[in-house]
Image (cartoon, grey):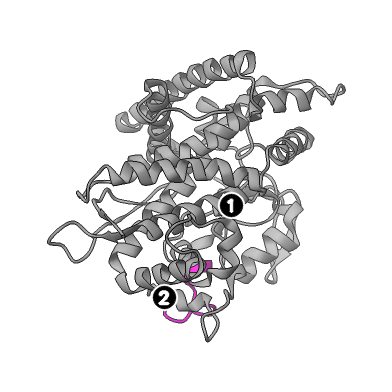
């Protein structure tokens, strides 16, 4: 038995994770961690200690050197944006499930950063990695309840889930180690693996931790793919189901960018309607209904309530995005809530928290925002997104696990001339 504190509402979450960020900066140990990550290696699950701060600092330095938030990162993304457009054009207006195309494009962006180059989409090694990653995510969704009710481990159904998760993580370790070793020995281009190892050598007083290194790569890969790809899948649904919004964005893109060149990050300040639509998708379909649990390192008073030391804290991001204090009719999809009166400026963007806040906010937030903007804007510039023939809407259900994902669906992309 242990206490779990739930943080509800924007002001409460902000007070805890920003104003008292250090006190809420650690992570709890879960039952399943004993089987798949007993050392809590990586960035996501690691407790907030000197070991974490050392590796987190290396990670930040390397990503900066690779151009995080700079023009060089945009060029990496655009390579995959152009390839995605080409692959969609080959569908020839036929309805299809866009999940694989979106996931593989986003995956190749993060692969170009971590390993120095992307894969051909049909490459068997690439497909094996995607299959393993999503199998682990699906398994983690199923085992989530065991972390809160460990007694379930005695039931046959959950025993099988635990055994399956052990096997999957074992296979992933073999897979990722094989690729990392090859990249470090043979890949000449700048990449996260090589730069991370070089950066670690500068700290002679700290012993290099290979498990932490591999765990960090795993976290970057999983977070860098699933969050962005899922947001884009929701964006496609919302555009297909809101043709009036889609038309407004396309008119804005034609006016600002034209049809001959693709949108760039330089255009973003002049595309408020496009940005407002992306923000509303992230609010309306909260990617992480609950941020990854935090662990207190010091007792703290939040909203006049004493939260003890050493308790689990779960920030409810869904409550931030759906409360009536900040949002009028939050259950409705309205991009106007992020626009000023004449729709020339984006407002209230700081009221949403799709990537959480504070010292444990998503490490790849900058990259994710760049990817989502470039993929989303280019898709609407190049295509009309519509439901399958004979259908007025795309009907999906929310699949709530670690993230909020849409159920499988089909959609048509009609080339705009």
| SS at badge 1 | loop
Q: Is residue 42 above or below residue 284?
A: above
Residue at x 75%, y 63% (from the top left corner): 19
Using the rendered view, name the quadrant where residue 378 is placed.
Answer: bottom left
Residue at x 36%, y 68% (from the top left corner): 246
From the viewer's perspective, tell me whether residue 277 is left or right of residue 412: right
Q: Nearer the viewer, residue 173 or 381?
A: 381
From the viewer's perspective, tell me whether residue 307 is left or right of residue 38: right
Q: Nearer the viewer, residue 377 or 261?
A: 261
Dominant secondary structure (helix, strand or loop) of the stretch shown in magenta: loop
Residue 276 x %, y % = 50, 70
Label at residue 3: 1
Q: Nearer the viewer, residue 284 or 233?
A: 233
Residue at x 53%, y 19% (from the top left corner): 179
Q: Is residue 60 above or below residue 155?
A: below
Which class describes the residues within 10 Å of circle 2: few (<14), some (14-19), or many (20+)? Answer: some
Residue 162 x %, y % = 40, 28
Residue at x 24%, y 44% (from the top left corner): 91
Which segment is the magenta one?
Answer: 320-331
Quarter that holds the N terminus: top right
Question: In this rendering, does residue 11 appear at all?
Answer: yes
Residue 303 x %, y % = 67, 71
From the viewer's perspective, tell me whether residue 373 is left or right of residue 163: right
Outermost residue on the front side: it is 260
Label at residue 334: 2
Foreground mark, 1 or 2? 2
Q: Nearer the viewer, residue 343 or 51?
A: 343
| SS at badge 2 | loop
Q: Is residue 17 above or below residue 173?
A: below
Q: Is residue 205 above or below residue 298?
A: above
C-alpha gap between disc 1 and disc 2: 38 Å
Asked if the stretch drawn in magenta spans residue 263, the answer is no
């Amino acid at each position: 038995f242990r206490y779990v504190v739930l943080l509800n509402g924007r002001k409460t979450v902000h007070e805890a994770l920003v104003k008292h960020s250090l006190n809420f900066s650690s992570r709890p140990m879960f039952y399943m961690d004993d089987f798949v990550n007993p050392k809590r290696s990586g960035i996501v699950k690691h407790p907030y200690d000197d070991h974490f701060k050392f590796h987190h600092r290396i990670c930040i330095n390397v990503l900066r050197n690779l151009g995080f938030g700079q023009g060089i990162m945009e060029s990496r993304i655009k390579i995959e944006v152009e390839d995605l457009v080409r692959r969609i054009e080959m569908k020839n207006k036929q309805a299809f499930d866009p999940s694989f195309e979106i996931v593989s494009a986003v995956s190749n962006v993060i692969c170009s950063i971590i390993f120095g180059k992307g894969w051909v989409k049909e490459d068997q090694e690439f497909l094996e990695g995607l299959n393993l990653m999503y199998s682990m995510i699906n398994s983690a969704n199923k085992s989530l309840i065991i972390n809160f009710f460990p007694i379930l481990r005695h039931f046959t159904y959950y025993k099988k889930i635990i055994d399956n998760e052990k096997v999957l993580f074992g296979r992933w370790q073999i897979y990722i180690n094989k690729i990392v070793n090859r990249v470090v020995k043979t890949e000449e281009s700048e990449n996260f693996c090589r730069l991370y190892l070089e950066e670690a050598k500068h700290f002679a007083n700290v012993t290099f931790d290979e498990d932490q290194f591999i765990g960090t790569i795993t976290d970057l890969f999983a977070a860098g793919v699933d969050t962005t790809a899922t947001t884009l899948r929701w964006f496609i649904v919302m555009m297909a189901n809101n043709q009036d919004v889609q038309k407004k964005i396309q008119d804005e893109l034609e006016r600002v960018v034209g049809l001959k060149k693709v949108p760039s990050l330089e255009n973003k300040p002049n595309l408020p309607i496009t940005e407002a639509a992306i923000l509303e998708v992230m609010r309306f379909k909260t990617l992480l209904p609950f941020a990854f649990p935090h662990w207190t390192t010091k007792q703290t008073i939040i909203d006049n309530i004493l939260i003890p030391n050493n308790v689990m804290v779960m920030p409810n991001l869904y409550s931030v995005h759906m409360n009536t204090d900040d949002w009028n009719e939050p259950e409705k999809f309205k991009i106007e809530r992020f626009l000023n009166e004449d729709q020339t400026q984006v407002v209230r963007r700081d009221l949403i928290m799709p990537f959480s806040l504070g010292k444990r906010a998503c490490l790849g937030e900058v990259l994710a925002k760049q990817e989502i903007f470039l993929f989303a804007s280019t898709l609407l510039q190049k295509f009309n997104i519509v439901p399958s023939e004979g259908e007025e809407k795309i009907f999906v259900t929310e699949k709530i696990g670690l993230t909020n994902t849409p159920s499988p669906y089909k959609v048509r992309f009609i080339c705009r001339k």
